[in-house]
Amino acid sequence: EVPSYWICDECKIQIMIIDQSILLSSACNHAGNKSGKVDDTHVFRQLLLNHLTFLASGVSDAIVAREFLLAKWIDQFQLEEKQTDHRAYEGGAFLDSNILCAHFFAQWIPSEPLGKSAGCKNQLSEEGNARIFRALAATSEIALSFRNLLGVVVKLMGDDNANALRKLAVKAVAQVVQVDPSLMLQPSLRQAVSRRFLDQAISVREAAVSLVGCYVLQDPKVANAFHSSLIARVGDIGVSVRRRVVRIFRDLLISQPGYSGRVDVCISLLQRAANPREEEGLRDEIKTMFKELWFEEGTPKKIKLSNPGVSIATDIADDFSGQDLPLEKIVKISNNEICELQPKDSVSDTPAPKTWRKKSDAVETHQHCETVASQMIDVVAVSKDTIFLEKMVKELFYNDECNKDVKKLICDGMNGDKNHCSRLVSALIEELLQLEERRAGSTQRDGDARLVSIVSTIGIFCEASPGLLAPHFDTLLPYLKADNLLSVEEEAKIITIICRLLISLVSVALPKADVQRLANGSVANDLEKITYKFGSVASAAAVEALAMIARRAGLNAVSEARNNLMKLAETFYGYLYKVKDMTSDYSTSTNGVQSNLKRALSVLGSICQYHETEELSHFPDSELLVGDDPTTFPFLEPSLLSWGILSNACFSAFSFFLAKDDVLTKCAALNAMTGVFLARPRVMLAVENKGVIANLLSDKTHPMAQLEALRCWKNILAAEEWRVESGQAREKMDKNANVTLSKRISGDQDGDSSICGSVLTQHTNRIYQLAKSPHAAIRLAAVDLIGLLLRQGLVNPMETVPHLLALQGDVKNPSIRLLALQLLIREGEKRPDMLRQRVCAGIREAFLFQRGVIPRTEQVTAVTLETDECSGAVRVECIFGLLYKECLSTSKVIKQALFKSLIRLFLFSGFVGEGTHVADSDACDKGSVQRKKRQENQKVVVHPAESSFDLPLLCYASQMLAHLPYTASMDPLFIIHHVSNAITVHGEPLLNYIVRFLGPHLAEIGGVENEDDEDISLEEDVLEKAAKSKTPSRTKAARVLENSNFDFEFFAQLCAKAATMILLLRLKQFLKKVYSLSEARCTEYTPCDKDKFSDKSINIPEEIPIFNNKFEGLIQDSSSPLVLDKDALIRVYAEFRRLMRTAGSEKEKSNSDKPTESAGFVESATRKDPLDAKGATSQQSGNTGLVNDDIMGNIEACRGMKVTPKTRSNPKRAAVTSSKRQRKE
């Protein structure tokens, strides 16, 4: 029903304000305050209270809300009364707080609810009441203090003391900005958020990136403001940060195709995807992004966004804000599309004709293809590596992982991708023609670097699907003339791409008539000229194209292409014959001679590679049999050269120059010889019999020649693999009439494909040795060759894995480590048990490899450091971390076996000279004269025969245990448990022995009170105090080391053994601190108990410090003498005592909490009597597997020392003992 009268909310609010003001004024007059003014806030409160009173009869929650607001207001009035102290406000007296308090308190019990007639007149609509509530909220205390609160939150974002607090502060700012996105453009807030992009904590950086990512799509200004910061985070150390940035850029590029920074974004993402160290998941996301952005049909606005909806709906609603339409009629948003609706009055509901829609779609598609083509050209122009982009385009046409259930769907998608790529190629060709038109119309004829970018982009599609370029083939052929006024390098790049396109089209796409036209046209002459002007890459491509044209034109037909090939062979062969006797070392020749010699060898090698001797041997100009042994073929004169004997004659020339003295000529000849091996694999058998291959890989050969040999063998194997997989071998077999059906079935029809691999398998041991060569380039080439041999099944993986594990120690060459790791992971997926069994030995092999490669002055390390260029954050990564995570982390038994094998390295058997170095003055006098002469210098040399352990290996092992990527707290707890046992059984007897060894000597200078005091190791002695000085050896306490009766060499051996215990003590403290493990938790852990739920989780900090495994001045390995500095020995001794005291105090504190706990059983038994601990030790060794019979040597050594009854410390007795000793001497 239409009401009899209607008042809008605006007028109704004004009327109600006047009515409420009159009511409040009358209440004030009744209370005696005639001069009071009515505040609008109080009026709004009364209006809101009336609305809640009206709802109280039907809504139960309205009563609670009404009473809460009344209580809050009354409390606020009382607080204002105390603060104002009845003083009048400036500009006039307002209502007294007591009056307002009484007024609202009188309404606590609501009167009878208003009737419907009164409600219609005195009640606002829902929108009106919401406006009143917002007005009251704007005057609240929290709203008035918004700027201060936001400033506090922004300040907390920069608190360097708590990572979690900074992360929560960033998330709080995100909640605030979600209400008001314009705050992101404020300079102060933008700078504060940008600084969090460089935060040391990964979680804070991720929160900051997420904050910015929510608003870059809503406002282009935000995207431009944070562009450089987001680009820098593409290479962030944290995977979560990189993944978040990739998703942000994906949505940004799809929603804004014209984004100004799109080129930088695409280049950064392509470089990240091409990084071999990047995770597969993130690489797949980048690949998916580019497929959606460039290689899917349709315009970007139809593609699903990661954050769809809210901001776009708001923008569309603002456009229709002046029209009387509800919001749901203006815009309708779904996850897949955005459909804009217009008023019915302005636009008819009749759909547009189909022809118009088709034309509109065609125009949009064409514009989209032009935009994508321009973007790809810009990206290729700046990008240095387009391999990842080429692989991605190939995957659009070749999907080997098709499932039968979705095969039809994938094939349909591939057809759509091909159509879209065809349109992209057309757009690229159009861009090329427009560029040529601009160059033709320009008054200054010069080169344009964009031409290289366009042709390079076309070459990406050429590698994936050459058929796309068949309609545009004639447009690209003129670029073979190389008259584009570009540099030699740029012209060579264009020529190589066109030649590759020519090879692909001639082999599969072009009809034979077009091929014959090319063979007899100017293309053959252009290809011939290329070999005289450009480098080896362009020349090889030109020769291959020329040979392909001659082959497809007809072997028996006389064509210009075949004549050009023979002409090239005669020219360059004649030059080789001309300079063959010029010198034995061409490095002393002119640059022109060296360049021409290299070009001649390169071109002849390419001609031999595509020279089909078996099919051309029947030519009448063949004077010698093609099947003869080429190693015995003479170096013929150029006049005797013919097509049939070309391969043998060239091989003879290559062998001649391979014997020259200069290494560059050797490498060029070997590279040319590879062409003969590729065309005639059986030649490698003859070369192997002559010992040429063994000679090239030997240590006598120059490293550059070794490197070239490894590369050549790899190219040969890769070419044979491609020949078989591409079907060329089968095609050649089908054309050969001599191969009968029975031979084809028998499997010996293509025996040449396995000859090269069989020959190289005879030299696998030498290839393994080259994988550990001192030269990094040789190591990389050897590992690359080993990977190819593994893939083809030509080497035994069980023999290869140890060498690949050793290469994990190549910390200075990440590419070698990563390539070896990829091979290991691939083998681990096939044979997991085999790899797990060899990891322990591989860790030691990596140490030995590293020690053999790095200089002796550097310490072997088990970690690599990766520094973020922007934030400066350093990530410490164990060299076996990725292998541990991929292959070992899932097996508890294998992990614990690895831990125990590493800890076993620290256990030693017996003390040096056990029972002989006691406090006997007569024994100390023997050999004192000779000993004094050896100790005149500061440093002492001890031969390695006197030491049974390798300290650098132990430093390496401790660092390995400290930085392995543990996935559960049971892993560090297991290590701490066994380390504690080793310290108890080995460390404490060693400490007691050292103390009793030094006791008589320190007593002479008053360093200790009693050599037999049981608490002597619990106090700081004079040597520990001396260790705190800058040069401990110059202190008064260090003079005891220079006494004639002091055995310094034996003390050095004791300190060296103490260093092993120091590493274990440091490791225990490091693991407890990094993974937040309390002493009680470490004590409660027992390996044989069932795993607890808490032991399966782990607290991994965002930044892990580097474990300290160094001893300054203490250098030792098993292959060189032990060089010991007195200062270093004193510091080692002091640190050993200090760490042992700390470990003892922590254990006593833990035992005091649980006095009956079994963790201290071995320690108490050992302290009481080493022999009494025998049973406990045996029982413990059965649990841990670490304590063996060698421990009893330590116990016997302790028992063999002079031990007097324990007495309390007494200064007088110490003085008496010292005087008796002096009289005896």
Image (tube, grey):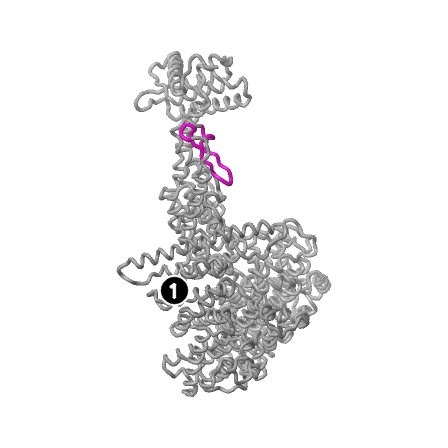
Residue denoted by label 1: 478
Tag 1 secondary structure: helix
Specify whether residue 329 is painted magenta.
yes
Q: Estimate how packed mark 1 is, as few (under 14), some (14 to 19) or many (20 or more) residues with alpha carbons within 10 Å.
A: some
Residue 1166 or residue 237, whichever sits in front: 237
**View extreme (left): residue:** 443
Residue 1004 in the image: above or below residue 438: below
Which region is colored magenta? 326-347
Q: Give percent across and percent down for residue 11.
A: 38, 18
Horizontal placement of 191 versus 1102: left or right? left
Q: Give percent across and percent down for residue 1048.
A: 54, 75
At a point 47% along the width and 30% down the height, the residue shown is: 328
Residue 1100 or residue 1200, whichever sits in front: 1100
Specify whether residue 1076 is painted magenta.
no
Horizontal placement of 152 versus 726: left or right? left
Q: Give percent across and percent down for residue 429.
A: 40, 56
The amino acid type of the residue labelled 1 equals Pro
Quarter where residue 20 is shown: top left
State the count of labels: 1
Q: Is residue 1038 visible?
A: no
Q: Is residue 316 visible?
A: yes
Q: Give percent across and percent down for residue 1029.
A: 46, 65
Q: Quadrant of the C terminus?
A: bottom right
Residue 980 or residue 1019, whichever sits in front: 980
Residue 392 or residue 617, whichever sits in front: 617
Horizontal placement of 995 versus 91: left or right? right
